[in-house]
Each structure stands twice: as C-alpha cells, then as structure tokens.
Image: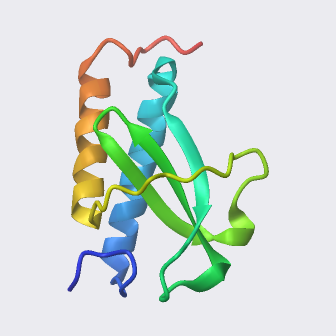
Amino acid sequence: MSNTDSEPKDKSDVYRDRNLLALAFVASYAECRARVQVGWWPDTDDVNGEEWAVVWANLPTGQVGWHIRREDVPDGLPKRDPNYDGYTTEEKNERLREWFTVVYESDAVTENPL
C-alpha cells in the first residue's frame, strides 16, 4: 500500500490517522502557548478534486495536514497557502508523534485543569 493521502487506505490506516489527530489535538490544548500557524487550502490534486480541502498546521516538528470535505472547513479557519513541503503520510504521523511526545513529557500537561 502506498503512503500518500491521494490513494486508498484501509480502515486501520484511517483510524490510525484520526487517532494521531486526536492525540495532537489534546497536546495542542495542553500546549496552547505554542500558537502554531494553521489554515486550510483547496486540494489541488486530480484525485480528490475541488470538493476537498486540506487543513494543515505548521508544528515545531514540521507541517501536517489532512484531507477533509470542503464543506466541513470551519468558517473561522483562515484560508492560507501552506507552502506544502512534500511530506508523506508516514512523515506526517512521525511529526505528530514527535510533537505530542515532547508535550506529554514536559510540564505542559497537568492534573489540574484550568
């Protein structure tokens, strides 16, 4: 199986991506001082067409992004060209793993919520 987001994935690949996203979200909540640059951009490949967008973030460990339906892009998310750096799905997942590992190993995660 290929490691690009433009080709079919099996169910376990999809859930793995989403699980990493959930973990990264929790990490970002704990590390809100990071203020990463985020946005969305129309998908430009021929596979997904104009009905899709890429939501992305520039983390300290590198750029990450996910294809979502264009209609699901929140109104408040800025439309910004991400200057895509060519990462693969494996590279994206490693960047996420590196980022949330640093956050979870720091003092940013606390037992006392706000």
Q: Indicate the quadrant containing the C terminus: top left, top right, bottom left or bottom right.
A: top right
> Camera-side residue: 64 or 106?
64
Q: Estimate the x, y position of residue 46 in percent, counting from the top left.
A: 49, 88
**Residue under the image location 40 percent in, 57 percent down:** 84
Q: Quadrant of residue 1?
A: bottom left
Q: How many marks?
A: 0
**Residue under the image location 53 percent in, 84 percent down:** 48
Q: Estimate the x, y position of residue 25 in percent, counting from the top left.
A: 48, 41
Colour treatment of the image: rainbow
Side (left or right) of 108 relative to 77 = left
> Camera-side residue: 111 or 12?
12
Q: Quadrant of residue 23?
A: top left
**Residue under the image location 40 percent in, 81 percent down:** 6
Residue positioned most to the right? 75
> Camera-side residue: 46 or 106?
46
Q: Is 87 situated above or below 60?
A: below
Q: Quadrant of residue 71?
A: bottom right
**Residue under the image location 79 percent in, 51 percent down:** 75
